[in-house]
Amino acid sequence: MAGIQPPHTPIFGNQHETGGLLASPLKLLSGTIVWMAIVFMVSTIGYAMAGWPLGDAAYMVLTTVYSVGYGEVRPVDTAFLRMWTIMTIVLGCTGMIVLTGALIQVFNLYQFRRFLGLDRMQNEIERLDTHAIICGYGRIGVQLAKALTEARHPFVIIEREAAKAEEARTAGYLTITGEATHEDVLMQGRIDRARVLVCALPNDAANVFITLSARNLNPAVQIIARGEAPTTESKLFHAGANKVVLPTHIGAERITELILFPATESMLGDIREVGTIKRNLNDFGLDLEVVTAGERGALTGVTVGEAERRGAGAFFIVQIDRDGGQSIQHPGEDVRIEPGDLILLVVRGSRLSAGAIFNAPQRPQRHGRMFIG
């Protein structure tokens, strides 16, 4: 992608993942065992070449690398035997120290996994199907996790920072600690069986790479990506995102609505069914909005039918609330809009452009050669 640089990868690789925590000590342990086996065989052969019986040679190597100190089985009285014993002490004893440390690490990690319930959590992740994957446990990720929990929708969180991942686990969420830009981490979250993936990171480049990886691993998954810069929107779509959300743009639009249409909150805020109604309307590209008819607004004094005609299909009026407490539901075309009326609109397209029609000042009407405001 032009203009997008790969996200930063730590020099020492990804060690946050649960599997990665355990894999490194296991590799060290297996490597050290192989090393000690080679040292034992080579050292035993060396003593056998010096004329020692094979049993004595093996016993000498064992007592040396384990630092038992029972004494030499046979005299070490030649330059070759002394050099060979020194080599066995240096390589064998050093190997035993590393082997002991690796064993301690493996035992401790297995105990931690059992104590923290990571094995149980990974088993639950393996059983997920048609679930959601949330990449990033920041402000958006936290709200998503709460909402999906309330909706009883299965999900798993992928978070690279250990502290945030631990916070998510403490909250009771299935969590993987790792880089969501890595395909193996996405596979650990069962991207192949996921229904939707949400890229909620504040890093546009990371969201693009996650989208690319997820689309490659599961062509059928629905991808909802977050973008910070408006120029990133097209890149996310090209990478394979189904929907792109720009929080900054949404926030600015919401603040504009509160400035221009403050009546919406007071009229709709306490109605429990409004959320469901708005979601159903959104499926058809519609929305609810409340505007106030100004004293000298462009549509103040005209009929409902005339107002809807001037709107050219941008809205239609479903309710008018007046100062005296009168509420007119489904007003007819001949009902006249009065100053101070709270007007409930079903808006098609941009609610801002629909509301702007009501907020525009009245145009002066021409009578003969004179204009009357």
Image (tube, helix red, strand yellow):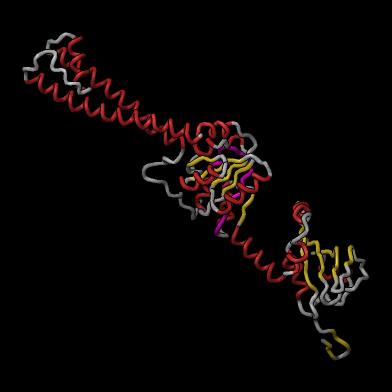
Is 131 contained in the magenta span?
Answer: no
Which residue sits at x=14%, y=25%? 86
Residue 264, percent from left and from top: 75, 66
Question: Is 96 placed left or right of 132 in the picture?
Answer: left
Is residue 69 something one can see in this rendering?
Answer: yes
What's drawn in magenta, residue-wise? Answer: 213-228
Question: Number of callouts in the render?
Answer: 0
Question: Is 198 placed left or right of 115 in the picture?
Answer: right
Which residue sits at x=55%, y=56%? 232
Is residue 212 something one can see in this rendering?
Answer: no
Residue 1, percent from left and from top: 51, 50
Tell me if residue 366 comes above or below residue 20 in the rendering. Answer: below
Instruction: Give the position of the C terminus as an image quadrant.
Output: bottom right
Quadrant in the picture for residue 139: bottom right
In front of the other: 252 or 307 = 252
Residue 296, percent from left and from top: 80, 80
